[in-house]
Image (cartoon, rainbow, N blue to C red):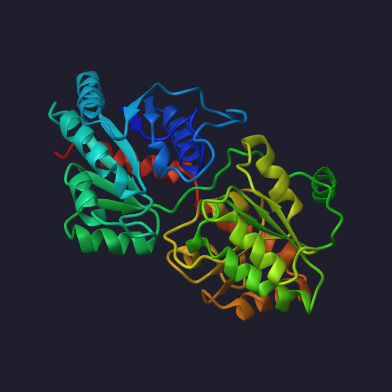
C-alpha cells in the first residue's frame, strides 16, 4: 500500500513525533510511506513550552516536509488537494487534541474526495484531559471524515463508542517506544548525572496539572520517613514551575528532589531511565501514557494511579503497582513497598514479558486490515 502519515514529525519534537517516526519505520518494511508535518503546529500564544523544534539527534527519522499550517484554512485546502492528487491508499493521522479537528477534518474531506484514499485515525484521546469549549464539535467534525479508527486503551474505546456508536475500529495497545536505545549500566548512568543516592525514583515528561506531580511531592515526606530516596523530576514545565519549586521548599524537600526542568534531547532520555529504579506516574487523569511505554523499553517497573488505561499497562503486583489517584499516602506506601520488598529485579523480568504484546507489528497489521477498501 501507499500510505501517507499526516502529523507531528521531525524536525518537530515530542512523543507524537517519536510515535510517527516509529510508525513510518514499521510500515515502511512492507509499504511505501510518506510523512507530512506542520510548518506551524501551534500558534506561539497557545504553546506553553520553550520551543517546538527538536534539539537532539533524529534517532531514526529524516526530516518530513513541513507543509501544514494548523490555523490557516487556505493552507488546509492546498495540502488536502496535494495529498488527494497523490492518491495514497491510506491517510493516517494521530488525534490527541480537538484544536486540530478543523485542520485534520478539512484535509481528510478533500483527500477522500478522490474516491480512493481511506482515512484512518489513531486516537490518543477522543476528548482531552483539559477540557475546552468546542472540544466535542471539533472532534465530531474531524471524525466525520474518518473511515476507521485505532484506539489504544479501553477508556478511549468507550469514549469513541459513546461519540460514534457505529464507528469501525480496532483496539491495539500503544507500542513500546524503542527509539531511545537500550538501558545502560545504572551506576554509570548515575555517575554521568552526578547522582550518588542509593534509591532513585523518576517522574518524566511534560509537567501539567493532570499528571499529578504535586501529588507525588506531597507523598515524598511520607516516603522519606521510611527510606532515603531521591526524586528526579525530568521534563519541561507546561505549568507554573515556580509553584512546584515553592511546594518543594514548603515541604522541605530541597535535599531529596532534583529538577531537570527542560526538554530532554532524544540521546539523553535513556540516561535518566537507566539511572532510575522505578518510574512513577501519579496522574489525575489519563487515557494511556507514552511514558509507561518508554519505561518498559528500558525494563523499568512503573507505579501508576488507577486512571484511564494505565492499569491496563501496569499490571499491579507484576510490573509495578497501581494506586488510587490523588492519594499521597497510598503512593508513598507503594514506593516504600517496592523498596522494602526489593521487587525491582522481579518486576523487571515481568516487564520484559509483558512488553512483548506492545509491538509495532500489531499496529501495522491493524492498519493493513482497516486500510483495505471494503468489498
Q: Is residue 192 left or right of residue 276?
A: right
Image quadrant where residue 120 sits: top left
Quadrant where the image shows the C terminus: top left
Q: Residue at x 57, y 58 (%)?
A: 354
Q: Is residue 35 above or below residue 178?
A: above
Q: Is residue 32 left or right of residue 256?
A: left
Query: In the rendered image, is residue 315 in sight?
Result: yes
Q: Position of residue 365 (x, y in %)?
A: 37, 42
Q: Residue at x 26, y 37 (%)?
A: 103
Q: Residue at x 47, y 40 (%)?
A: 19
Image quadrant where residue 219 sits: bottom right
Q: Position of residue 227 (x, y in %)?
A: 80, 74
Q: Nearer the viewer, residue 131 or 188?
A: 131
Q: Is residue 183 above or below residue 115?
A: below
Q: Residue at x 76, y 71 (%)?
A: 339
Q: Position of residue 46 (x, y in %)?
A: 40, 44
Q: Position of residue 277 (x, y in %)?
A: 73, 59
Q: Is residue 297 above or below residue 226?
A: above
Image quadrant where residue 158 sits: bottom left
Q: Nearer the viewer, residue 137 or 112?
A: 137
Query: In the rendered image, is residue 1 in sight?
Result: no
Amino acid at each position: 500500500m501507499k500510505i501517507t502519515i499526516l502529523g507531528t514529525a521531525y524536525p518537530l519534537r515530542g512523543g507524537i513525533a517519536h510515535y510517527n517516526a516509529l510508525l513510518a519505520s514499521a510500515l515502511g518494511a512492507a509499504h511505501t510511506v510518506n510523512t507530512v508535518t506542520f510548518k506551524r503546529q501551534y500558534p506561539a500564544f497557545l504553546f506553553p513550552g520553550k520551543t517546538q523544534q527538536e534539539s537532539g539527534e533524529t534517532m531514526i527519522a529524516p526530516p518530513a516536509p513541513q507543509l501544514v499550517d494548523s490555523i490557516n484554512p487556505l493552507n488546509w485546502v492546498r495540502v488536502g488537494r496535494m495529498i488527494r492528487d497523490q492518491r495514497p491508499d491510506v491517510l493516517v493521522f494521530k488525534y490527541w487534541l480537538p484544536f486540530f479537528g478543523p485542520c485534520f477534518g478539512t484535509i481528510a474531506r478533500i483527500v477522500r474526495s478522490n474516491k480512493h484514499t481511506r482515512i484512518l485515525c489513531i486516537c490518543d484521546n477522543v476528548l482531552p484531559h483539559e477540557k475546552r469549549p468546542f472540544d466535542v464539535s471539533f472532534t465530531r467534525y474531524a471524525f466525520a471524515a474518518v473511515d476507521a479508527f485505532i484506539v489504544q486503551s479501553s477508556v478511549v474505546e468507550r469514549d469513541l463508542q459513546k461519540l460514534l456508536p457505529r464507528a469501525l475500529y480496532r483496539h491495539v495497545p500503544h507500542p513500546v517506544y524503542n527509539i531511545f536505545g537500550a538501558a545502560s549500566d545504572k551506576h554509570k548512568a548515575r555517575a554521568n548525572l552526578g547522582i550518588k543516592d542509593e534509591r532513585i525514583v523518576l517522574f518524566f515528561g511534560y509537567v501539567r496539572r493532570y499528571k499529578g506531580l504535586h501529588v507525588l511531592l506531597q507523598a515524598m515526606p511520607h516516603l522519606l520517613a521510611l527510606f532515603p530516596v531521591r526524586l528526579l523530576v525530568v521534563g519541561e514545565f507546561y505549568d507554573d514551575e515556580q509553584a512546584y519549586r515553592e511546594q518543594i521548599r514548603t515541604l522541605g524537600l530541597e535535599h531529596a528532589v532534583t529538577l531537570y526542568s527542560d526538554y530532554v534531547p532524544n540521546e539523553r532520555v535513556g540516561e535518566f531511565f537507566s539511572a532510575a529504579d522505578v518510574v512513577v506516574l501519579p496522574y489525575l487523569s489519563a487515557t494511556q501514557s507514552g511514558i509507561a511505554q518508554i519505561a518498559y523499553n528500558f525494563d523499568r517497573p512503573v507505579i501508576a494511579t488507577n486512571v484511564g488505561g494505565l492499569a491496563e499497562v501496569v499490571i499491579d503486583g507484576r510490573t509495578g503497582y497501581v494506586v488510587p489517584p490523588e492519594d499521597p499516602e497510598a503512593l508513598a506506601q507503594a514506593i516504600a513497598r517496592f523498596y522494602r520488598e526489593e521487587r525491582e529485579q522481579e518486576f523487571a523480568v515481568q516487564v520484559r514479558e509483558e512488553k512483548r504484546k506492545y509491538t509495532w507489528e500489531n499496529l501495522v497489521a491493524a492498519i493493513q486490515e482497516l486500510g483495505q477498501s471494503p468489498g
